[in-house]
Amino acid sequence: MRVTGSHRAAAALAVVLAVALLAGPAAGCGAGPDSPPARSTPAFPATPPGGTAAGSPPPASPPGTASGSPAATAVPGPPAFFDDFSYQGPADPRLGERGWAVRSAPGGPGVAGATWAPGNVAFEPDAAGGTVVRLTAETDGTPAGTRQAQLGQRGPRFLAGTYGARVWLEPDTDPPDRPLTAFYTVSAFAGSAEPSYSELDFEYTANGGWSGYEGPAMYAVTWESFQPGNPVRRTAKRPGDVSGWRTLVIQVGDGRVRYYVDGEPFGDHGGRYYPESPMGVNFAQRLIKEGLDTGESAPRAYTSKVDWFYFTPELIDPDAVSARVAERRQAGTAFQDTVPAP
């Protein structure tokens, strides 16, 4: 939501070094206006009112897995990483114990001079009785007054398999700035031209801003490298408002990277763009590099939410991802990690 009231070139290198504190650089997430025009496909249908499958979060975890409670039952089956994000706040020690880190280190991507504020990562109850992560970017129109949010893993550990997350995307309310919501995976940084660099992005711009596009759009970007001035990537773009609760799935296997939104195919990349290195998972809410309206001084905020994250080294379809999440919630499992080290 937008709140008003009283109240990515050399720079890319510095950007990456800062973000490496989590799982490596968010190079794609820092592309901003440098992103090329992308292949466009029809818009997703608007999120239905009243709570259909596309517009509502999955059922919450049963009683006993609320914030602060341990996972109640281990779910047998293939290796999996699952987190229902049942935490009490950004300082909850279980976040670190489970490999997550709330970013505070300065640097890009986003507005130069902005702060990555741990306090802008919160855990709040949802209408279904569970807990979601809330990520907030806020600004008063100045870089010094801009605070962004990122929750990511401390190190890369996933590669081939299926990644899924349930993410709430903010509606376009014609804000003065250009906010960006990102769910992405990225390898550790070893140089901007490193041939084994790997990054897979879902990015939603509620108010446009890339390649001159002025409306809301969803992007899927697969990176081979991010050499300053010569990034190597494939991009799929779908213009239009896709706000609301969305299930975002990335399949990595058989030489292809396939993206899905609510089960619908979105992008399909392969060849040189196929990831080669283990990656960590990140969620971020920020403004794009040149997305700050310095002519507007009223405080405002932009929000996204994350209901759950799931990974398995198997290749499974989006419906199976949702079914496995529901199975864990029914069993009272708020967290599971049986994925072997890379």
Image (spheres, rainbow, N blue to C red):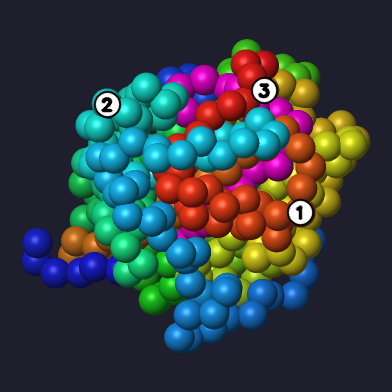
Residue 244, percent from left and from top: 48, 70
Specify whether 72 is left or right of 220: left
Residue 147, percent from left and from top: 27, 44
Q: Residue at x 68, y 75 (%)?
A: 43
Res. 289 in view: no
Which contiguous range is marked in magenta? 153-169
Q: Name the quadrant of the N terminus.
A: bottom left
Contact between labelled residues 3 and 2, with CB atoms less than 8 Å apart: no
Quadrant of res 303: bottom left
Mark 2 Cα shell of 10 Å, populated few (<14), some (14-19), many (≥20): few
Mark 3 Cα shell of 10 Å, populated few (<14), some (14-19), many (≥20): many
Q: Residue at x 70, y 34 (%)?
A: 78
Dot label at residue 317: 1
Determine which residue is flagged by label 3: 278
Specify whether 27 is left or right of 195: left
Task: Using the image, determine if residue 176 lies above or below residue 165.
Answer: below
Label 3: element kind: loop
Label 1: element kind: loop
Determine which residue is flagged by label 2: 93
- The front one of 107 and 246 is 246
Q: Name the quadrant of the C terminus.
A: top right
Residue 32, percent from left and from top: 55, 48
Mark 1 Cα shell of 10 Å, populated few (<14), some (14-19), many (≥20): some
Upstream in sequence: badge 1 or badge 2: 2
Q: Give the distance between the C-alpha atoms of the residues marked 1 and 2, in whole angstroms.
A: 33 Å
Dot label at residue 280: none
Task: Using the image, determine if residue 218 lies above or below residue 21.
Answer: below
